[in-house]
Image: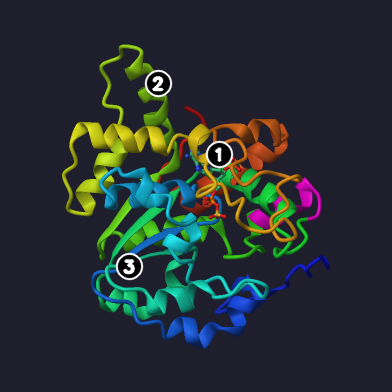
């Protein structure tokens, strides 16, 4: 198979986007959200697939067979991705999908099609700390042949910090959505809290009294559903990193290897909090801490970089 060409970035209102997204901008901006749409929004590599599978399991009342009917990216279309070699696009799929729809986006607040705000759609935002997001995004650039060339780690990290990567600045993204939740129906969750829940679940099964599914219950409540404990437990188990990693419906093995080369880096790579320590030098870590203080210090938004 002929290797595909890595894309370039094109600014849309000052935010770097994949060229094909920019080329389809008018169509995306005119997207007609429906009042009962649920949007899952994240900065890339925040654990989107994790929260997608949790939502999908909640919607199917914990029945894995219903989730196993199609890969996650088909069940929940990604509206702002227009990859040249993949048809139909998420937007095409979303447009013909019956209601109620669940959709995925990486768009920052200023670029979200206005109909989502007009229809006051429910939105789940899943955020992950900058350091682990940067590491995960770097490895994803290495294996995803549609993304721009990442350069070496130092180069990539500088671009990440400057927001010169697809979907723009992590800082602007997490902050924009944090502020938007004051005005709209947005459930803002953290990867680190979800991971802590997983770890507690392991202890719970070994006799601890902690609630193993706090974050999953929050999602169910936001969706207006009350699930029995047994169902919640099934969801916790089904969405454990180890289980999603071997599940062909969630590990992106359905994407051909000339696009996602999982011999370079797997999509479900490590799934931990603190992997950044294996990549950052002390100076780079300090640089990130300073940037967090400078760019987020005056907000109430706090990220944990270890558990
Ligand atoms: S994408 O391409 O932006 O939609 O990717 P996304 O799904 O947001 O991010 C992939 C990272 O999320 C991790 N992940 C998980 N961690 C813990 N538990 C579960 N169940 C889980 N599912 C996905 C995945 O491993 C990627 O992170 P890294 O750090 O690279 O391992």
Q: Disc 1 designates what residue? A: 245
> Mark 2: which secondary structure?
helix
The residue carrying pointer 1 sits among few (fewer than 14), some (14 to 19) or many (20 or more) residues within 10 Å by Cα, namely many
The mark nearer the N terminus, 2 or 1, is 2
| Residue farthest toward the top in the current orientation of the protein | 207
Q: Nearer the viewer, residue 267 or 177?
A: 267
Left or right: 186, with 299 as reference point: left
What span is in magenta? 151-160
Give the answer, above or below, for where 288 lies relative to 186.
Answer: above
Label ID, residue 101: 3
Picture quadrant of ligand 1: top right
Q: Position of residue 53 (x, y in %)?
A: 41, 48
Q: Position of residue 300 (x, y in %)?
A: 36, 47
The mark nearer the N terminus, 1 or 3, is 3
Residue 284 quadrant: top right
Q: Disc 2 designates what residue? A: 202
Q: Nearer the viewer, residue 97 or 28?
A: 97
Q: Is residue 155 magenta?
A: yes
Q: Are marks 1 and 3 in contact (CB under 8 Å)?
A: no
Q: Nearer the viewer, residue 35 or 68?
A: 68
Question: What whole-number distance in Å separates the C-alpha atoms at marks 1 and 3?
Answer: 25 Å
> Mark 1: which secondary structure?
helix
Q: Position of residue 96 (x, y in %)?
A: 39, 79
> Mark 3: which secondary structure?
loop
The mark nearer the N terminus, 3 or 2, is 3
Nearer to us of marks 2 and 1 is 1
Characterize the magenta stretch by its predominant secondary structure: helix
Left or right: 77, with 166 as reference point: left
């Amino acid at each position: 198979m002929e290797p595909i060409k890595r894309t370039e970035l094109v600014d849309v209102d000052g935010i770097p986007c994949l060229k094909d997204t920019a080329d389809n901008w008018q169509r995306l901006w005119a997207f007609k959200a429906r009042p009962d749409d649920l949007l899952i929004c994240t900065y890339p590599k925040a654990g989107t697939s994790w929260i997608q599978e949790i939502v999908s399991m909640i919607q199917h009342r914990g029945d894995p067979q219903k989730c196993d009917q199609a890969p996650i990216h088909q069940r929940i279309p990604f509206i702002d991705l227009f990859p040249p070699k993949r048809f139909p696009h998420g937007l095409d799929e979303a447009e013909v999908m019956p209601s109620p729809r669940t959709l995925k986006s990486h768009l920052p607040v200023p670029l979200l099609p206005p109909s989502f705000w007009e229809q006051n759609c429910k939105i789940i935002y899943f955020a992950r700390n900058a350091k682990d997001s940067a590491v995960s995004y770097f490895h994803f650039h290495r294996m995803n042949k549609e993304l721009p060339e990442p350069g070496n780690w130092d180069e990539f990290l500088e671009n990440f910090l400057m927001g010169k990567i697809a979907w723009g600045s992590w800082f602007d993204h997490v902050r924009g959505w944090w502020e938007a939740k004051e005005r709209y129906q947005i459930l803002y969750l953290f990867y680190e809290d979800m991971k802590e829940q997983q770890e507690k679940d392991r202890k719970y099964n070994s006799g601890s009294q902690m609630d193993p599914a706090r974050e999953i219950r929050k999602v169910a409540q936001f969706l207006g559903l009350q699930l029995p404990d047994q169902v919640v437990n099934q969801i916790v188990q089904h969405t454990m990193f180890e289980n999603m990693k071997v599940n062909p419906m969630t590990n992106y093995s359905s994407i051909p290897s000339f696009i996602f080369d999982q011999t370079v880096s797997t999509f479900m790579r490590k799934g931990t909090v603190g992997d950044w320590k294996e990549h950052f030098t002390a100076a780079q870590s300090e640089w990130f801490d300073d940037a967090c203080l400078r760019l987020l210090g005056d907000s109430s938004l706090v990220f944990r970089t270890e558990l």
